[in-house]
Image (cartoon, coloured by chain):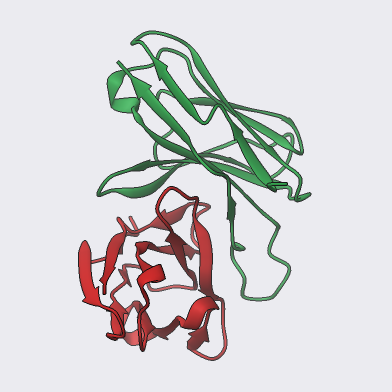
Amino acid sequence: AQSVSQHNHHVILSEAASLELGCNYSYGGTVNLFWYVQYPGQHLQLLLKYFSGDPLVKGIKGFEAEFIKSKFSFNLRKPSVQLSDTAEYFCAVKTDNNNDMRFGAGTRLTVKP
Amino acid sequence: DADVTQTPRNRITKTGKRIMLECSQTKGHDRMYWYRQDPGLGLRLIYYSFDVKDINKGEISDGYSVSRQAQAKFSLSLESAIPNQTALYFCATSAPPGLAGVVWNEQFFGPGTRLTVL
C-alpha cells in the first residue's frame, strides 16, 4: 500500500534560519501532492499543492516545494523562517490507483527567537 | 462565518455510548470527508462521500459509520465508543477535480472535534 513518510518529527530552528522538511512517498504512478499547515489550536490549511507542470511550486507565506519524481519526494522549503511559522506541517499524497488520500505523520516546527 | 463547521467541538463520553459528530459546509462542495488525527500518526481517512448517495470506506472505517443527509451535511457516528477512538476528528470538503492531471483537489478542513472516550 502507498505510504507517506515525513522523517523529521520535530524541528527546532532559530528565527531567520532556512527550513527544509522532507516528504517521501511510495507510489510510481500519477500523484497529486499537498502540504498542509496546522497552527496551534487551529485546523489544517493548505500551504501549496502540485498537480502537474513546473515541479517547483510556490505557496503562501513564502513556502515552496519541489517535486522530484525520481526520488519520490516533495520537500517543503522556506529560506527564512519566522516565529509565526511555528506549527505542524503535513505532507499529503493522492494517487490515481485508489480513492484514499494519505497524510504523513506530520513534522512539528518550533521557531525560537 | 466559517465555511466548514463541526459540532460539538469537544466531547467526553464513556465506553459503549453512541456518539454522533456533525459536519456542515457552505462551500457548495460535493465531496466530504472524515479524518481522525492522532499524535505521531497524522491524519487518517475514515469515510468519504462524493455526493449524497455515495459513501466510501477510508483507511480506518471499522467502528465508525456515516450518513450524508444532504450535500451540505455529513455525520460521523461511533455506535459503541471505545477508548482507542479518543482522537481529534476533522471534517473536510473539496470540489471535484476539474483539470486534467488533477486526481483529487485540495481539501478545506473544519475546526475539529476533540473526542475523549473514558
**Residue A110 in the image: above or below residue B117:** below
Chain B visual colour = green
Q: Can residue A25 be seen in this view?
A: yes
- Out of B78 and B110, give the one closest to the viewer: B110
Which quarter of the rendering shows the C terminus of chain B? top left
Q: Residue A59 location in percent, x, y?
A: 53, 79
Q: In which quarter of the image is residue A74?
A: bottom left
User: Would residue A11 appear left or right of B96 to someone viewing this image?
Assistant: left
Q: Residue B29 location in percent, x, y?
A: 74, 50
| Residue for point 46% across, 63% down | A36
Chain A visual colour = red
Q: Residue A111 location in percent, x, y?
A: 28, 71
Q: Residue A12 location in percent, x, y?
A: 21, 70
| Residue for point 59% across, 65% down | B103
**Residue B14 in the image: above or below residue A111:** above
| Residue for point 75% across, 38% down | B72
Q: How many marks?
A: 0
**Residue B50 in the image: above or below residue B53:** below
Q: Quadrant of residue B63?
A: top left
User: Would residue B33 appear left or right of A40 to someone viewing this image?
Assistant: right
Q: Quadrant of residue A35?
A: bottom left
**Residue A4 in the image: above or below residue B17:** below
Q: Can residue A5 be seen in this view?
A: no
**Residue closest to the far front:** A113
